[in-house]
Image (spheres, rainbow, N blue to C red):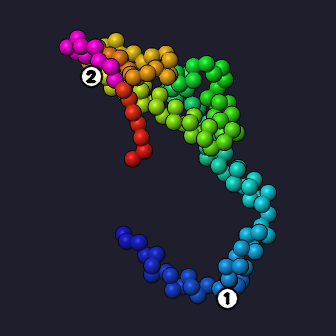
Amino acid sequence: MTMQSLDLLPALRELPTDDQRRRSFREIIEDLHATDVALSAAEFTASVSFGMSSIWDQVNVDDTLAKAHAAAFNNYEGSLYDHWREMADRGTESADGFISALKGKVSELNFAETLKSRGFTDVTIPDDPTQPVWDIIATAPDGETILWQVKNWRC
């Protein structure tokens, strides 16, 4: 079965519209200014919160993400959700830093599991999230102790 959308375009163009003429850029901008901003904001917020509720709901936080939060922010006493709200309220830079710290710690946790699955023992992530030089220390199958740095970046 192939898509027939393009075959329907001529019929779509014949449908009646309220305004048969093209509107100018100025008219479009005036219409945007005339929209009810509060209503639009409420609708947008409701739709985003519904879509994001499973991600940020305190009850539905993924175990790895919860562990990453506890490890990356070991002095924070509130929940991941509360911490996120605080960072988001502070602004973009705080929210970006918060997410970056979580991503780094999730990467470390995932890499530690990978090392264990490949026969490494004594796999340790330090308690201090600002540990200099290395992120994980582990003993290789041949008995050698190896220090690892774990990095993640956008592709």
Mark drawn on residue 118: 2
63 sits to left or right of 151? right
Tell me the magenta residue range.
Answer: 140-148
| Residue 120 quadrant | top left
Task: Please state the total of marks drawn on the protein image.
Answer: 2
Instruction: Provide residue 60's location: percent of width, then percent of height.
Output: 59, 32
User: Which element is circle 2 on?
Assistant: loop
Seen in the picture, residue 103 relative to 35 is either above or below; the reply is: above
Please report the residue visible at 46 percent of the width from the left and 20 percent of the height from the top: 131
Mark 1: amino acid: Arg
* Residue 54 appears in the rendering: no
Seen in the picture, residue 27 relative to 40 is either above or below; the reply is: below
Instruction: Provide residue 87's location: percent of width, then percent of height.
Output: 65, 35
Please report the residue visible at 62 percent of the width from the left and 44 percent of the height from the top: 92
Q: Looking at the image, which is closer to me, 145 or 140?
A: 145
Label 2 crowd (10 A; few <14 / some 14-19 / many >=20): few
Please report the residue visible at 61 percent of the width from the left and 84 percent of the height from the top: 15
In magenta segment, residue 67: no
Instruction: Provide residue 147's location: percent of width, then percent of height.
Output: 33, 19
Instruction: Provide residue 10's location: percent of width, then percent of height.
Output: 51, 86
Mark found first going from the N terminus, 1 or 2: 1
Mark drawn on residue 21: 1
